[in-house]
Amino acid sequence: MVFETHQGNIGGSVWKKSIIIVGWLITICIIASSVTAVTVNPGTFFRQGNENAIYGFSTTMQFNIITITADNVTFNTTIFNFTSINGVEVNITFNEFVNNQTYNFTHNNTGSRVWFNISDLTPNLQYSVFHNGTINRTVTSDINGDISFNSTDWNGTILIHPSAAQLLRITARRNVVDTINIANNVITILGIVLIIASIMVIVFIVTKYQ
């Protein structure tokens, strides 16, 4: 009787430790998944490799990843290549990013033609370009989701977003993607729960009947 009681206590102890360990693992996974990789604040600047564009921020923003190369700067997956033809420095201050589809930035340039090249937008979609609140032009992204336009002596706020007629298309597409992502997350969580439960059951059985 003493031996059986002792074994039962060991089993209970292992069972409790297993629950504590699993709890810590779940907590660590939740914290890790909620952490944003890169936070930038006003006063932070990125210079575009070999080009003459400097990118800054008017407010605190968070990105999953920022990549700087000789030709461009990538925030999350959207690639920016702003450059002047005659080497005049181009100062860009980002004010807002919305769903990787709408970009609001302040452009400071005088005396040079500047090319604005943005990649990884929605392919074959019409975008409106506003300068200081007034629509200046519309551009259509190509099959790769790239848009390109140029300007001379634009100083002020530039807003780029999908044209009104295109917003429903993006919203519908995003809702489908969000639904798929939610379903995938639920499946992943259920899978993790089942694995953890299976491990706990095995640990209990081994410690109970060894």
Image: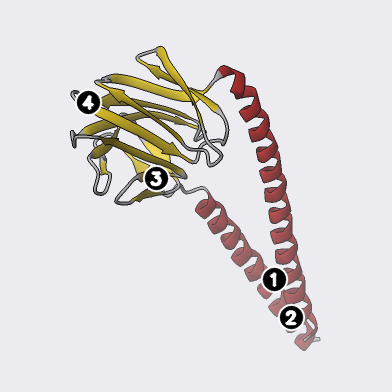
CB-based contact (under 8 Å), mark 1 and mark 4: no
Tell me which numbered mark, 2 or 3, is placed earlier along the sequence.
3
Measured in 3D between alpha carbons, the distance from the residue under mark 2 to the one under mark 3, in whole angstroms, is: 53 Å
Q: Which numbered circle lies on residue 74? A: 3
Q: CA distance from mark 1 to mark 2?
A: 8 Å
Above/below status of 184 relative to 54: below
Q: Position of residue 61 (x, y in %)?
A: 38, 36
Label total for image: 4
Whichever of labels 1 and 2 marks the residue nearer the N terminus, that label is: 1
Residue at mark 1: 15
Instruction: From the image, state whether disc 4 or disc 3 is nearer to you.
Output: 4
* N-terminal label among 4 and 3: 3
- Specify the label residue 109 is tagged with: 4
Instruction: Give amino acid for label 2.
Output: Thr
- In which quarter of the view is residue 179 placed? top right
Q: Find the distance from the CA under tag 3 to the CA under tag 1.
A: 48 Å
Where is residue 142 drawn, in percent x and y? 53, 36
